Amino acid sequence: MKKCLSVVSSVLLLSLVSCGEKTNNRRQLSVQNFFQTEKGIYEAKLESLNSHLGDEARGKAVIKLKGDEMLVEIQMDGTEAQIVHGQFLHVSDQCPTLSSDTNNDGIIDDLEGRMNYGSALIPLDSDLSIQGEEKFIFPKADFSGNYSYRSQTNWTKMITDLLLKDTNPSDGLVKLNSAFNLKGRQIVIKGISPNVNLPESVKAIGSEDIHGSIPVACGTLIKVASDDGYSDYNGGKD
């Protein structure tokens, strides 16, 4: 009897190991497939939102995928001076318009904006490889309201994290449940001065700071070069 139990246990253990290996292989294959379809250069022209609450924020975002690396660069002008600005890659394919102000309070808050740009997928902070950090480190505008951001990460590490189970569904961040599809995603810049008086109708996600959550610029990513086109890419310059 003991010998039979031992044989059964061994079979079960081998089955579990085999299933684990298949899961890991599928995940690794997914990561590789994501990169093969995504590699290239993407740009987004960031247009102003809620400019009546501060300055008219405008800028440009560039995302480059080559080898096993992802590089994100953002240049912003006209943002609120000396304010930290949250930056996120959102999942949907449209920036808010005036009609997005559904409660007619004159402000497109983050809840209303998400009806267009959807939930946030990647916080564009100091560490792109980890989605759910305890504290995001975002760029701070200088005294002129300008800032530059640049961050690079390992693609495989980032996608592996995005394929994990969502352990905090109330934080406004979502995990991947389909192809990555950078083309058509939205880059959203957030944050206005805490001195701006806001009506009670303005809402944010969970316990997020209201002023820090206000979208001030948004742009749609378009693919401007394939992986083979890196040598010819000039950043949109003539």
Image (cartoon, grey):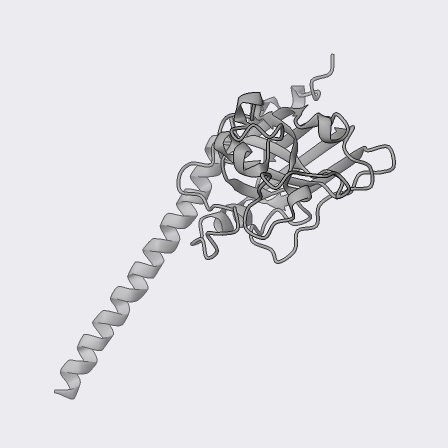
- In this picture, residue 196 sits left or right of residue 43: right
The residue sitting at the bottom extreme is 2
Query: Where is 5 relative to 173, above or below?
Result: below
Q: Is residue 230 visible?
A: no
In the picture, the quarter occupied by the N terminus is: bottom left
Q: In the rendered image, which quarter is residue 96 located in?
A: top right
Q: Is residue 166 visible?
A: yes
Residue 174, image x, y percentages = 48, 45
Query: Where is 73 relative to 99, above or below?
Result: below
In the picture, the quarter occupied by the C terminus is: top right
Residue at 66%, 51% in the rendered image: 136
Residue 213, image x, y percentages = 63, 41
Query: Where is 165 relative to 189, above or below?
Result: below
Residue at 50%, 29% in the rendered image: 116
Residue 29, image x, y percentages = 40, 45
- In this picture, residue 157 sits left or right of residue 127: left
